Amino acid sequence: MSELGISPLTKGDRHLSVDEARAAIAAALRPITEGETVPLARALGRVLGSDVISPIDVPAHDNSAMDGYAFAGAALAAGGVTRLRSVGTLYAGAPYAGEVRAGECLRIMTGAVMPEGLDTVVPLELCSVAGEQVAIEPGVITPGENRRRRGEDLALGRPALQAGRVLRPADLGLAASLGLAELPVLRPLRVALFSTGDELRTLGQALEPGCVYDSNRYSLMGALQRLGMEVIDLGLVPDDRAALQATLQAAVAQADVVLTSGGVSMGDADYTREVLAAMGEVAFWKVAMRPGRPFAFGPLQRPGGQPPSWLFALPGNPVAALVTFYAFAREALLRLAGARPEPLPTLQAPCTAAIRKRPGRTEFQRAVVEPAPAGGWQVRLTGSQGAGVLRSMSEANALLVLRHDQASVAAGDFVDVWLFDGLV
């Protein structure tokens, strides 16, 4: 039994379910804690390192939520028309210096500070105006309406943003509204990436018979960049014990995570197992899923007593590499980066065609979510679902997920969908 809580799986052992593998990975990881402070304009996509406490009330004053007329709500006539005299105009950013007496009102713009004693705003379209005279019909407004109260968005001393949040555009605007020019964030997670295989060629090289260009490294590099990770590209590694060992040593010396594709299937991983066993405690798992069955995960020792570098060894087939990344590595890397765990964004939509499926494994099908003719959304497969058909992954905008215990689905059945916009 390993420190991961699951024995390393070898030939003859049962297959792990996707959920079991995800749970084992989550239980093993501890997030990084090193932080830095960055300007607000460079904080998008970074993980917030500590809570942001509001240094002010937002809004700082009671203000108008509408363009209209501000008055004291107590002046509303019971059951009759309320008649007021407008004594001035108040714009946002220019507090009113005069006095508003009983029976009077002010023309006010959205965001303008509500003068003392005025607590209600009637929108322009709900009143009648003739010169300075403003008439309000009964029932169109109640006392206190259309006033934004001081601190109702954020009160002084209250948490505005919580640590572990992956900062989004609205978060930057919220921080700016508090007058904050910079934010505390965790340093980016460093991920070393390489592909293995004698048949692989890098871009620009001649393509001999039987060889293919390395696509996995570029797909995975893009996925990592979308997560805000710092990518260390170590290129291609041949199927050679010494080359693999040297590359892994270079990787763990500088990275929190080592992400590889290829070299983890039962037929080609004997020397890989020996190298990894000497460097750490890596479990080779057979996961009950399609595509992407072979997968390896575990800690690799780092020099100088540093925390381990975590290995995620993905299958070599292009689609299987991306699917296993989304299924296992994506959420784990965010957790390691200090982000608060969030469930994968899942949509349910009716499938346009029947899909054959046997219980006992999770299947990920490349799919397109699109508007349904009768309204709402529907999902259809992109075509061939072979693990090497990367074009179908490019054409898809989602993964259709058939769960472990699920059987075949009929046309019109609702299925789970992972939208790529929430994944990559």
Image (spheres, rainbow, N blue to C red):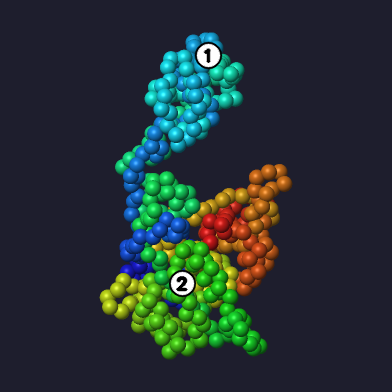
Q: Can you say whether 376 is above or below 70 in the image?
A: below
Helix, strand or loop under label 2: strand
> Which amino acid does the dot numbered 2 rest on?
Val
Q: Which mark is residue 368?
A: none
- The structure residue drawn at horizontal position 54% and vertical position 66%, both measured from the top left corner, is 323
The correct choice, above or below, for 309 with respect to 107 in the image is below
Please state the horizontal and vertical placement of residue 335, each as a whole percent of the image: 40, 61
Q: Amino acid at mark 1?
A: Arg
* Residue 57, percent from left and from top: 36, 39
Report which quarter residue 401 is drawn in: bottom right
Say which residue appears at 58% left-offset and 73% top-offset. 318
Q: Is residue 393 left or right of residue 306?
A: right
Outermost residue toward the left in this view: 305
Residue 73 to residue 214: above or below: above
Q: CA distance from mark 2 to mark 1?
A: 68 Å
Which numbered circle lies on residue 83? Answer: 1
Residue in the image at 39% along x and 60% along y: 38
- The answer to which image quadrant residue 136 occupies is top right
Nearest the camera: 269 or 50? 50
In the foreground, 44 or 341: 44
Q: Decide: few, some or many residues near mark 1? Use Cα within 10 Å; few <14, some 14-19, many ≥20.
A: many
Residue 337 x %, y %: 39, 63
Mark 2 or mark 1: name the one nearer the start of the chain.
Answer: 1
Where residue 231 is drawn, which disc sits there?
Answer: 2
Q: Quadrant of the N terminus?
A: bottom left
